[in-house]
Amino acid sequence: MTRVIHTGDTHVGYSQYHSPVRRQDFLDAFEAVVDDAVDDGVDAVVHAGDLFHDRRPELPDLMGTISVLRRLDDAGIPFLAVVGNHESTRGGQWLDLFERLGLATRLGDEPVVVGDTAFYGLDHVPVSRRDDLDYAFADHDADYAALVAHGLFEPFGYADWDTETVLTESDVDFDAMLLGDNHTPDTAEVADTWVTYPGSTERASASEREGRGYNLVVFDADAAGGDDRVEIRRRALDTRPFVFVSVELREGEGESRVRERVREHDLAEAVVHVEVTGEGEPVTPAAVEEFASDEGALIARVTDRREVDADGEVDVSFADPEDAVRDRLDEMALSTAARDVERAVREDGVPDANVRETVKRRIEERLDEDGDLGAFEAVGTDVEVVDGGDERDDLDEPDGDGGESRGRDEPDDDESKTEESNAEESSDEADSAEPDDTDPASTDGQVSMEDYL
Ligand SMILES: [Mn+2]
């Protein structure tokens, strides 16, 4: 029997909302997982990537992480990990540094056996490089085998990686795939193999509403009391409270109604998201945010989703608005890249706060496509517009908006609201916004892990 904690998407170093408090939260969550591992005496901690939010973690993030890993090491518990898209760098990996310090083991195509289970690793690989993968793994003689991987696998949301292909093409028969990248925890069975995401350990975006946690995975002949060889249980983590307030205003209602609804919640030290819909008077987001802060909130954000009056004449039939839009777009003969941008802006699947980063990432992805700039050329009207077919390809919002601070100059989605940042945040900001090296290929979007495989 082998018992491990399976975690991932820790995103240490993420100054969400430009908040140093939030930055500490991400490290604290990692520490909480390790505390549980030590208290519980598990056989290993398996990390499925995105330990760091950024490929350039700063010194406090590195030192904090090393301290946490050292505690694990002192307890004799191995840390087995793969590299995620957020932290991947061209010139070697942070994980290699930790391995060299004796604090981690980087998983790969050779088995790492803990107890009676062989662990293998598959770092994040961008879509454009996946056809080259042969999923060749060296033999093992352990009783069980698990593949730890970072990517968006079927059958879960935003998937772009076919799990069944991985399993059938692998020369090792895996009992479980322990995954990272998708921040929504979920478990499914694919071709007789358990496939599971533990989710992120702190909310890296406001779309990550359910409670955070990690998996406790047991490899055992009668793990679940039946034929299953693997048992996966979820454990909750105590993380920063997020409060979501939805206010539907009626005619004549306004800011005071919003305040009233906000005040109904316990805002103490919480991240508060207020969404305004319906009719009613205009609301000044900054005023409501200030009110929430006065009520004890750590961070407050207000989104007003009420529609502005649409005027102007429209000469399309609205029998099916989607069709009308599609027809018009086809007439425009946009380039593939332009279509990417258009979809990012229009799709419901991309939250407003993520549009900026999604657009950036998609353009980077196109640029990364082996230097082929065909995607930027207009598509002739006589040619069928290539739009990828599978809509999920375009919905790849792997980390909710966890990817938002990936950009070189792009700390996160809320930068438009930072006027009120205090001096400390601002200086933090200045640091993280310093220009990156000039290698155009070293963009660090979700898909820039070109250094690998
Ligand atoms: Mn992630």
Image: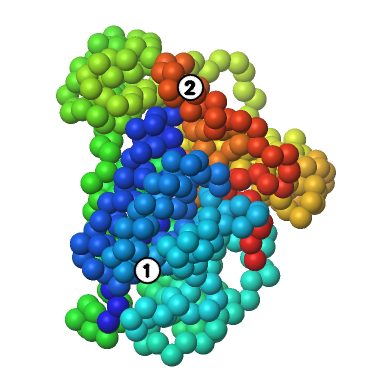
Q: Is residue 328 left or right of residue 380?
A: left
Mark 2 lies within 8 Å of ligand 1 (Cβ measured) = no
Please rate how many residues cluster around mark 2, counting C-alpha atoms within 10 Å: few if below 14, some from 14 to 19, many from 20: some
The local secondary structure at tag 2 comes to helix
* Residue 166, above or below 48: below
Give me the C-alpha separation between circle 2 and circle 1.
Answer: 38 Å
Q: Which mark is residue 78?
A: 1
Q: Which residue is mark 2?
A: 426
Q: Which mark is residue 302?
A: none
Q: Nearer the viewer, residue 11 or 350?
A: 11
Q: Is residue 191 left or right of residue 246?
A: right
Question: Could you tell me which residue is drawn at 65 percent across and 55 percent down?
Answer: 91
Give x and y (percent) for residue 256.
Answer: 25, 11
Question: Could you tell me which residue is drawn at 55 percent across and 41 percent down?
Answer: 406
Give x and y (percent) for residue 317.
Answer: 60, 31
Quadrant housing the C terminus: bottom right
Give x and y (percent) for residue 76.
Answer: 31, 69
Q: How many marks?
A: 2
Quadrant housing the N terminus: bottom left
Q: In the rendered image, is residue 8 in sight?
A: yes
Based on the displayed image, in which of its 4 quarters is residue 322 positioned?
A: top right
Question: Could you tell me which residue is drawn at 48 percent across and 80 percent down?
Answer: 111
Going by the numbered disc 1, the residue's amino acid type is: Pro
Which-is-in-front pick, marks 2 and 1?
Answer: 1
Question: Could you tell me which residue is drawn at 36 percent across and 45 percent down?
Answer: 27
